[in-house]
Amino acid sequence: MSKEIRYPIIRPTLPDFSEVEGDLRAIWESGMLTTSRMVRALEAQTAEICGVEHCVAMANCTSGLVLAVKALGLTGEVILPAFTFAATGHALIWNDIEPVFVDCDPGTYTIDPESVRAAITERTSAIIAVHLFGLPPDIDALQAIADEHGVTLMFDAAQGLGATYKGQPVGGFGAVEVFSMSPTKVITACEGGLVTTNDGELAQVMRQMRDYGKGLDGYDMAFIGLNARQSEFHAAVGLAGLRHLGDYMGHRLEMIALYRELLAGLDGVTFQEFPEERTTSGNYMVMRIDGEAAKMSRDALYDALMERGIQTKKYFYPALHRHSAYAEWGARYEGRVPESERLSHEGLAVPLYGHIAPEECEEIAATVRELLG
Ligand SMILES: Cc1ncc(COP(=O)(O)O)c(C=O)c1O
């Protein structure tokens, strides 16, 4: 019999309904249901927050990534971290590009620039880096490698909205960044994606690509696009959430600090390192369990917490090249990305929401301590 889940891993944080009611009614009454006033407002607000010139809203981040890879004209091989969510790789496979998996830094869990450098070949067209659990990677090092080899740098920024690197909000780094507004993100639009760039031409192509690939006359198809448009209702929900970005993110960061304080000193338990020049969006609170030192494996802890009604998430698990859909690469990358493999067996995300109460974190942390202590 399944246990009652008292603490789900995620509860979306939504503004009070009164904050969207008027907009939802106005959309209903206007009959303008997609890619109209609310979508434009969401795009403008996101561009302002990220300090970028252009934002193109999408139905979700995955379609934004697929279309960004296509719009950038990437070919051959693209380097990506093995320790990421599947959509990073899917965007390449949909574009018939060979994914080249590289390892992550054991402290920050973000893509390791030295592994990237070692993986560059003459077929490399780009590097996709990920703001991991909300933390940006070493962007300067990655941009330097990209410039040195004349390849594109782009970001799967799905979890990163609100993060900063050297005091600059993410969104304007590399050629393009793609954010998610799915229910698990700091700000949700129910579903949604946001593509940000300072390249006006690329933004224009992305706008056409989300609309089947239509040419400027609205008839002739200039590209093979998708329908990846965002509905007005989604944009209204996303926009209302965005007004609370500072509060929701600030609360998450406080709760992450509280968890870390309460879980400090446990044998075999470590946390994602946050270098001084980078701030995280706080999308996830992930701890790493070294099973031997903790005398309990990550998977056993996951089961024991579930027994007590606390849902956690093995994250990211498995490493991307280990999924069934990537079996062809799983065999080829055997032993080549050891940190990613290890992390995928040690990382555990605990419940974290923009509105989780400190007492809830205290109870969860106390249960972890009791199990590991
Ligand atoms: C790192 C990463 N990339 C891509 C995605 C895909 O985002 P979406 O669900 O909006 O397509 C996610 C979402 O969960 C993610 O965490």
Image: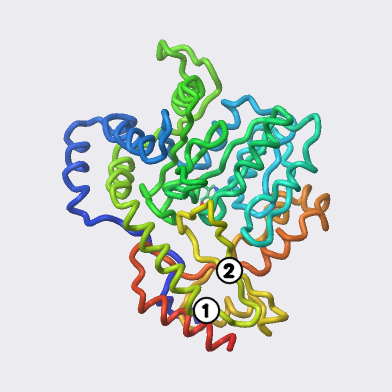
Q: Is residue 337 above or below residue 80?
A: below
Q: Position of residue 219 (x, y in %)?
A: 43, 13
Name the residue rendered at 20%, 41% in the picture. Answer: 23
Q: Position of residue 4 (x, y in %)?
A: 42, 79
The image's mark for residue 184 is none
For residue 247, side relative to residue 102 (left or right): left
Q: Is residue 76 above or below residue 275?
A: above
Tag count in the figure?
A: 2
Q: Quadrant of residue 297?
A: bottom right
Name the residue rendered at 50%, 24% in the picture. Answer: 199
Q: Earlier in the sequence, mark 2 or mark 1?
A: 1
Check disc 2 and report the residue beneath it. Answer: 271
Q: Residues within 10 Å of mark 2 (few under 14, many from 20)?
A: some
Frontmost residue, 226 versus 84: 84
Q: Is residue 27 above or below residue 335?
A: above
Check disc 1 and report the residue beneath it. Answer: 263
Name the residue rendered at 20%, 50% in the picture. Answer: 19
Q: Residues within 10 Å of mark 1 (few under 14, many from 20)?
A: some
Name the residue rendered at 68%, 85% in the picture. Answer: 295
Tag 1: amino acid? Leu
